[in-house]
C-alpha cells in the first residue's frame, strides 16, 4: 500500500513535486475554494482510470477538468459560444463548472463517454499554482470515496483516501464548502445540473436558467445522479418541520421509552442556526449560529463528518432556507438523506 503524504500547499517546492507526480501519472489531492479535489493528468488515460479506482467511482460518472484561465478552457470544447464567454467573464475563477461539447483533446474516460466535457477554473491560489506548474488540464473529482461526504480539509482527505493517493497538498479548510455549480450550455439554454457555489440568483443576472426535467428519481442528467450522495455512513433524515413542532413529538416518545426502560437511539441534530438541548438528543451541531447561509455551507461537510464519527444511530438534519447558497446546501442534505424526510424516518428506528 502506498504511503501518502500530507504537505503544505504553501511551499513552492511541494507544488513542483506535486506537478512532477501528475506528470508521472500519479494522483494529487489539492484544495480548491469549494472542496478538496483529487487530481490526475486529464490527458493520461491510465492516471484517470486509477483515479476512478481510488475513489471507487463508477466509470459512467464524468469528471470536471480544471484549468488556469478562460484561454486554457477553450481548446477543450468544440466551440465556445458567447454565453460561455459571458459566464466565464462573470464567474471565473470561481465555483462555476461549464459543460459544452468536447474537443478531441480530452479522452473519453474523463467524460465517461459523453460528448461533452465539464470545465472550471478554481479560485484558490494553491490550486492555480499547481495547475500552472503542471501546465496542462487536470481532471479532479471531489477527493472522497464515491457517494461519501466531500472533504473540506486535508485531514478529511487523508482519513478517507489517504492510502491511495501520492500526495495531499494542505491549503487549510476550503472556504465555500460545497462543490461548484454545474451548468450545461445547450443550444440557447443554460441547464442547471447541480446547484453549488455560484447561486441561482447570481446566474440569473447573466442568463435565464432552466432545470432538467424531473423524471422520477433520475432528475439530473449527471450530477447528483444518484438518490444517495454526499452521505455520511450514519443514517440521516431530513427534518422538514421546525424544531418546535417535531421536538415535542420526539420528546414524548423518548419519555415513554424511558418509562418502559426501552433503549432510545443516539440521535445527533444538525441544526441550521439554533442551539438546542433536549434529553432525546445526544448532540447538536449548529451550521451557523447567526443564520448565515454562506457560513453554513462552509461548515456543512466538516460537521457532517464530525457527527459521523460519533457512533450515532441517526442524524436529524434540519432544513435551511432555500435561497442563495442554501439551495446547494439543501441539495446536499436531500441526497445525504437518500430520500428520508420527516418524523417518519426517526420513528422507524427501533
Ligand atoms: O467544486 C467542484 O466542482 C469540485 C472541485 C474539486 O472542483 N469537484 C467536484 O467533482 O465536485 P465531482 O466529480 O465530485 O462532481 C462533478 C460533477 C458530477 O456530478 C458529474 O456528474 C458532473 O459534475 N459532470 C462532469 N462532467 C459532466 C458532463 N460532461 N456532463 C454533465 N455533468 C458532468
Ligand atoms: Mg463529488
Image (cartoon, grey):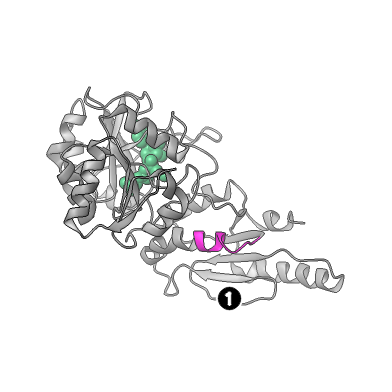
Q: Look at mark 1 in the image and give the residue it sits on.
A: 276
Vertical arrangement, residue 164 with respect to residue 341, above or below: above
Is residue 311 rendered magenta in the image? Answer: yes
Residue ID at (28%, 48%):
203
Q: Quadrant of the C terminus?
A: bottom right
Is 35 placed above or below 253 here? above
Q: Position of residue 54 (x, y in %)?
A: 43, 39
User: Residue 253 at x, y = what percent?
Assistant: 77, 67
Q: Is residue 252 visible?
A: yes
Magenta stretch holds residue 136: no
Image check: 97 left or right of 1?
left
Quarter of the displayed picture in which ligand 1 can be seen: top left
Residue at the extreme right: 260
Q: Which residues are magenta?
A: 305-312
Locate the N terminus by quadrant. top left
Give the percent coordinates (x, y) of residue 243.
60, 69
Residue 5 position within the rendered picture, expressed as x and y whole percent measured from the top left: 35, 53
Q: Residue at x 42, y 54 (%)?
A: 158
Q: Decide: is 167 above or below 24.
A: below
Q: Residue at x 35, y 26 (%)?
A: 109
| SS assignment at label 1 | loop
Residue 92, visible in the rendered structure: no
State the residue in front, 202 or 23.
23
User: Would you identify the image quadrant in which residue 175 lies?
Assistant: bottom left
Amino acid at each position: 500500500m502506498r504511503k501518502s503524504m500530507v504537505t503544505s500547499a504553501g511551499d513552492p517546492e511541494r507544488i513542483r513535486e506535486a506537478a512532477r507526480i501528475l506528470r508521472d501519472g500519479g494522483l494529487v489531492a489539492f484544495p480548491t475554494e469549494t472542496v478538496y479535489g483529487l487530481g490526475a493528468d486529464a490527458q493520461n488515460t491510465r492516471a484517470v482510470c486509477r483515479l476512478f479506482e481510488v475513489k471507487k467511482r463508477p466509470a459512467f460518472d464524468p469528471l470536471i477538468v480544471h484549468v488556469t484561465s478562460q484561454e486554457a478552457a477553450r481548446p477543450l470544447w468544440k466551440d465556445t459560444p458567447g454565453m460561455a464567454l459571458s459566464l466565464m467573464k462573470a464567474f471565473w475563477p470561481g465555483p462555476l463548472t461549464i459543460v459544452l461539447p468536447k474537443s478531441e483533446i480530452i479522452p473519453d474516460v474523463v467524460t465517461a463517454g459523453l460528448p461533452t466535457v465539464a470545465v472550471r477554473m478554481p479560485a484558490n491560489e494553491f490550486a492555480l499554482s499547481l495547475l500552472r506548474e503542471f501546465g496542462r488540464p487536470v481532471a479532479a473529482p471531489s477527493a472522497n470515496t464515491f457517494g461519501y461526504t466531500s472533504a473540506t480539509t486535508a485531514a478529511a482527505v487523508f482519513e478517507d483516501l489517504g492510502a491511495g493517493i501520492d500526495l495531499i497538498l494542505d491549503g487549510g479548510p476550503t472556504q465555500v464548502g460545497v462543490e461548484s455549480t454545474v451548468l450545461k450550455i445547450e443550444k440557447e439554454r443554460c441547464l442547471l445540473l447541480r446547484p453549488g457555489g455560484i447561486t441561482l440568483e447570481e446566474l440569473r443576472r447573466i442568463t435565464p436558467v432552466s432545470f432538467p426535467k424531473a423524471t422520477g428519481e433520475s432528475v439530473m442528467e449527471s450530477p447528483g445522479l444518484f438518490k444517495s450522495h454526499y452521505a455520511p455512513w450514519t443514517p440521516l433524515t431530513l427534518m422538514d418541520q421546525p424544531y418546535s413542532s417535531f421536538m415535542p413529538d420526539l420528546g414524548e416518545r423518548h419519555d415513554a421509552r424511558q418509562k418502559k426502560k426501552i433503549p432510545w437511539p443516539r440521535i445527533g441534530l444538525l441544526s441550521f442556526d439554533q442551539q438546542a438541548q433536549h434529553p432525546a438528543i445526544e448532540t447538536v451541531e449548529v451550521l451557523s449560529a447567526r443564520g448565515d447561509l454562506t457560513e453554513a455551507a462552509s461548515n456543512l461537510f466538516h460537521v457532517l463528518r464530525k457527527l459521523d464519527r460519533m457512533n450515532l444511530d441517526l442524524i436529524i438534519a434540519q432544513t435551511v432556507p432555500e435561497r442563495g447558497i442554501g439551495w446547494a446546501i439543501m441539495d446536499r442534505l436531500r441526497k445525504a438523506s437518500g430520500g428520508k424526510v420527516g418524523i417518519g424516518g426517526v420513528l422507524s428506528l427501533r
